Image (cartoon, rainbow, N blue to C red):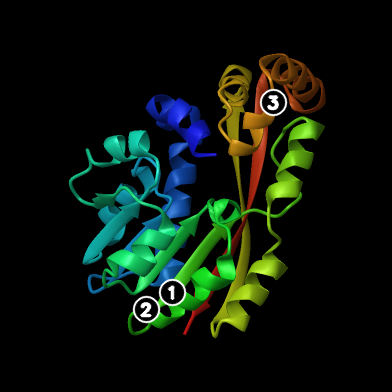
Amino acid sequence: MNNHYKKIADEFNNVWKFSDNYKKWAVERIGHILNLNIKDILVDVGGGTGTFSNLIYKEFIPNKVYCIEPEHSMCAIAKKYTNIETICCDTYYFINTLKYNYNKILFKEVIHHIDDRNKLWSNIYNSIGKNGQILIYTRPKEIRFPLFEKAKRAFYKNQPSEEMIVSELNNNGFKTKIFIESFTFKLSKKEWHAMIKAKFMSDLSIFSEQELIKGIEEVESKYCVNNFYYIEDKIIFINAYK
């Protein structure tokens, strides 16, 4: 999957054209659930181009925000933000080898990319600071985005269920709370089709250009209303704490 993000790194922030209100809502929910304050050291795992890492810092001014991203081209963009510290490595290397101090950790839309999560949860539990918390920002297996059916099935196959994630965390000593919320936003047909063509989600990377064109035709016939898409994003917040 890293090769997918390498290909779209330069246009990543343009590809994800969710509204500014959506970004503001997401940042506020993350900060409030984690109860971020000036004493906290936050790790944003798979922080990509650093957009949300930077927005979180500006909104809540924690002591420190680390943006952890394994893809070098993404890191190069994230390093332009001076409010955060970007480290180009994978999650396991950061947790197991670098051993930075931190007490809060965010997995925003990346949990499906992480293998051997049980080992990771165990290592985090043993290394996270006092009042340590994890927040997993993810989606249900049955996504509500206006996508073609083959794309929805690909997402379903790759996405771990919230029940599975909670079970893993509980088995490794964490207590958990789940919050489920939705945010609906509006995008033009041109914007949404461009996002699909650019394979804005890694699950779209398996489809050829012809399959995407055919998929967009399906999406338009099913979901487009007066040249716009009304997109409901259902988010599952899994908060784990010691």
Q: Amino acid at mark 2?
A: Ser
Q: Secondary structure at mark 3?
A: loop
Looking at the image, tell me whether mark 2 or mark 3 is earlier in sequence order. Answer: 2
- Would residue 219 be visible to someone looking at this image? yes
Q: Amino acid at mark 1?
A: Ile
In the image, residue 179 lies at what x, y percent?
A: 60, 68
Q: Amino acid at mark 3?
A: Phe
Which residue is drawn at the image coordinates 54% and 85% (left, top)? 173
In the image, residue 24 lies at what x, y percent?
A: 42, 48
Cα–Cα span, label 1 and label 2: 5 Å
Looking at the rendered structure, which numbered label has been put on residue 127?
2
Q: Are marks 1 and 2 in contact (CB under 8 Å)?
A: yes
- Would residue 17 be visible to someone looking at this image? no
Residue 143 position (above or below residue 187): below
The residue tagged 1 is 124
The residue tagged 3 is 207
Q: Secondary structure at mark 1?
A: helix
Cα–Cα span, label 1 and label 3: 35 Å
The N terminus is located in which quarter?
Answer: top right
